[in-house]
Amino acid sequence: MAHLQIEFFSNCLNRPVTFKLLLPNDPNDNWEPPQKRKGLPTKTLFLLHGYTGSAYNWVPEHLATLYNFAIVMPSGENGFWIDGLATGHRYGAFLGEELPAYLRKTFRFAMTPADTYIMGLSMGGYGALRAALAYPDTFGKAVGLSSALIVHDICGIQPGEDNGHANYEYYRECFGDLAAAPQGRNNPEVLVDELLAAGKPLPQIFMACGTEDFLLENNRRFHRFLESRGVEHRYIESPGTHNGEFWDEYAVKMVHLLFSEE
């Protein structure tokens, strides 16, 4: 497994940025179990960290070898993986356009949605779902773990208020006019309706959330929304809270779902 850290200049973020890349480029022919996609083109999985987090790999490396996929780990800082108001805060375009274009040009990875998947936890879970729906020509499958689907929760926050996680100014920088956020394109529900109205195919959606997670109702809401629109998806609840133990468990389960169903 090759471990790379790559720097390039981002026009979306107005500065040099780094991302981490794992490549299963040295499989052992005696490795057991046999590699399931041996000799086939390498696929790509983007991994998105959560709020206060940073780029790191939380998928066991042997799975990348088993299914022959590269792991791309960008840093979205605390930008919610969307385009903020300030110059240099276009995290959504960076994730959905600029970074995939760089990978295609430099490594010939992430060439089609069928080859490109995205998975995130918490803030990154929201980011993965939103990115796949905003850029369905880039991402073919999306996984949200304990996704921070908070757009309906934050729309009532007023200047000077803090909800215990962040203050009004932070959310406004990320989402813009908070009162209008549920009707905007940072709401995954709006993006689903746009794709359905245009008759375009949706990415495959996978979700999981712990039954003791403080974001459980947010995830149930989006699950019910997808059901109401007749959108096929996989939604799983099981005992767990908003922590690494749950994410480690479901990172493995979701990778098997993503790649074994092909």
Image (cartoon, rainbow, N blue to C red):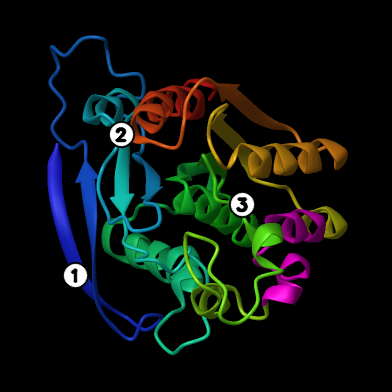
Q: Provide residue 138's location: percent of width, then percent of height.
A: 53, 56
Q: Provide residue 108's location: percent of width, then percent of height.
A: 33, 55
Q: Is residue 72 above or below residue 86?
A: above
- Give the numbered dot on residue 149: 3
Mark pair 1, 2: CA separation? 22 Å
Q: Residue furthest bottom?
A: 87
- Quadrant in the picture for residue 242: top left
Q: Which mark lies nearer to you, 1 or 2?
A: 2
Mark pair 2, 3: CA separation? 22 Å
Q: Which residues are magenta?
A: 178-194
Q: Is residue 83 visible?
A: no
Badge 2 or badge 3: first in the primary sequence:
2
Q: Is residue 223 above or below residue 63?
A: below
Q: Is residue 54 above or below residue 221?
A: below
Identify the secondary structure beneath mark 1.
strand
Q: Residues within 10 Å of mark 2 (few under 14, many from 20)?
A: some
Left or right: 140, with 42 as reference point: right
Amino acid type of the residue that numbered disc 3 sits on in the rendered structure: Leu
Left or right: 91, with 231 as reference point: left
Badge 1 or badge 2: first in the primary sequence:
1
- Give the numbered dot on residue 59: 2
Mark pair 1, 3: CA separation? 30 Å
**Label 1–label 2 contact, CB within 8 A:** no
Judging depth in this view, the residue of 248 and 150 nearest the camera is 150
Q: Which mark lies nearer to you, 2 or 3?
A: 3
Q: Residue at x 47, y 25 (%)?
A: 240
Q: Provide residue 235's location: percent of width, then percent of height.
A: 64, 29
Amino acid type of the residue that numbered disc 1 sits on in the rendered structure: Glu
Q: Main secondary structure of the magenta part?
A: helix
